[in-house]
Each structure stands twice: as structure tokens, then as C-alpha cells.
Image: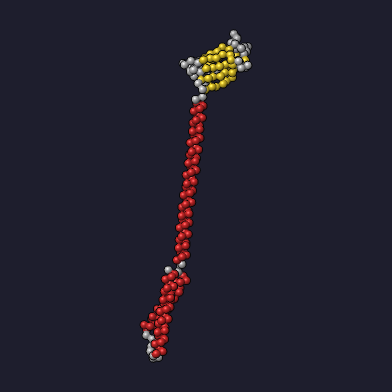
Amino acid sequence: MKKLFILLMILAAICFVTVWIYQTRRLKRNAQASISKGQVVINWGLIILFAIGLVGTFTAPDGKTTGTVQHQSATEHASTKISKAQSSSTTAKAASSAASSSQSGSSSSSSSSSSSSSQLQVDFPTDVSLNKTGDATVSFKAPANTQFEIKDSNNNVVTTLNGNAQGADQTYNFKKPGKYHVTAHNGDQTIDKDLTVRGISQ
């Protein structure tokens, strides 16, 4: 746009100088010649066009500046889009990581629960006393085919109880007070418990 005003100013200046030279020579050749209204209008028109071109040259925006501003605006807009995309990607990754951690935690909890639920379960009293006849009968409750090994405080095997397929309770009659160690086996599962047999209660 600025170039158009410059071009207009130059053309108006050239035309005005040409007309002025023509009119000056004409007056020199014929001193009595008069300037017509048309020539006056042309002169003033050229002066106005020159003034418009001059004003436009200083007031019109520079094309390069506008292009630079638009380019910077486009670049900033693209940068904003990229930043938003990266932010969205980071948020998605964080959410995915949190979900994976949650799934891992759930899996771990599930595995732990499964392990604890599959652990061998046995039930028997761990503190008994000899009765007046000098014995204490203990009943061992456990799943089918569970074997019990009972040792005294000196780690000597007192007895071994072999479970049956029906899973019936197994019993043993203790005759001596003391500390005993009971180990239950069922397949690859093992559980240990201590059992105390006290003397005849009064």
C-alpha cells in the first residue's frame, strides 16, 4: 500500500513539472496568452494528488512490517497449539501412568489376597492343661490330606498325624506338660504353630 502512494506522488510530481514547463514556455512564446480554467484545474489536481501521495507515504502501514507481525502472530499461535498439545500429551501420560500404577496396585493386592486365601488353614488350641487323669486331648482341624508333625522342646518328634481324604479332625493325647512345636504340611504349603501343655490344674 505504501508503494502505491509513493508511485502516485512521483507520477503527480512528474506530471506537474511537465505541465509547468509547458505552460512557462507557452507564456514565454506568447506573453499575451492566458491560462485556461482547465489548466488551473489540472495544476491543482496534480498538486492534490502529490499531497495525497506524500501523506499516504508517511501514514500507510509498511507491507513488510504487516507481514512480519502476521508471521509472528502465526508463529505464536502455532507455538501455543504445540504447547497445548504437549500439555495434553503430558496429562494423558500422567493419567496413563496413574492408571497403570492403580492396576499394578490392584493386581498386587489381588495377588496378596489370593496368596493369603490359599494359605493353609489349621485350627487347634495352643494352650491346654492336663486333666485329673493326667492327659490332654487336642483336636486338630485342617483340610483333607494334611499331615501334622509334633515335636517337643528338645526338637524330638513326638508323633506324626497323617490326614485322610475326608478331612476329618485328627486328635492326639498329650501325657506330659511342656512346650511343643506343631508343623502342618499339605502339598507345598506349610504352617508352624506352638502349643503349650500345662500341668494338672487344681
Q: In which quarter of the image is residue 172?
A: top right
In the picture, measured across the screen, residue 96 lies left or right of residue 178, that is left
**What residue is at 46 percent from the left and 60 percent from the top?**
71
How many numbered discs sit on the rendered protein? 0
Which residue extends farthest top?
Answer: 133
In the picture, measured across the screen, residue 45 lies left or right of residue 194, that is left
Residue 102 location, x and y as percent? 49, 37
Quadrant into which the C terminus falls: top right
Residue 147 location, x and y as percent? 52, 17
The colouring scheme, among rainbow, by chain, secondary structure or one colour, is secondary structure
**What residue is at 45 percent from the left and 63 percent from the top?**
67
Is residue 21 at least partly visible in the picture?
Answer: yes
Is residue 201 at least partly visible in the picture?
Answer: no
Residue 137 location, x and y as percent? 56, 12
Depth check: 51 or 185 in front? Answer: 185
For residue 69, above or below residue 154: below
Residue 27 location, x and y as percent? 40, 88
**What residue is at 50 percent from the left and 21 percent from the top?**
187
For residue 6, above or below residue 175: below
Quadrant into which the N terminus falls: bottom left
Q: Quadrant of residue 74?
A: bottom left
For residue 108, above or below residue 29: above
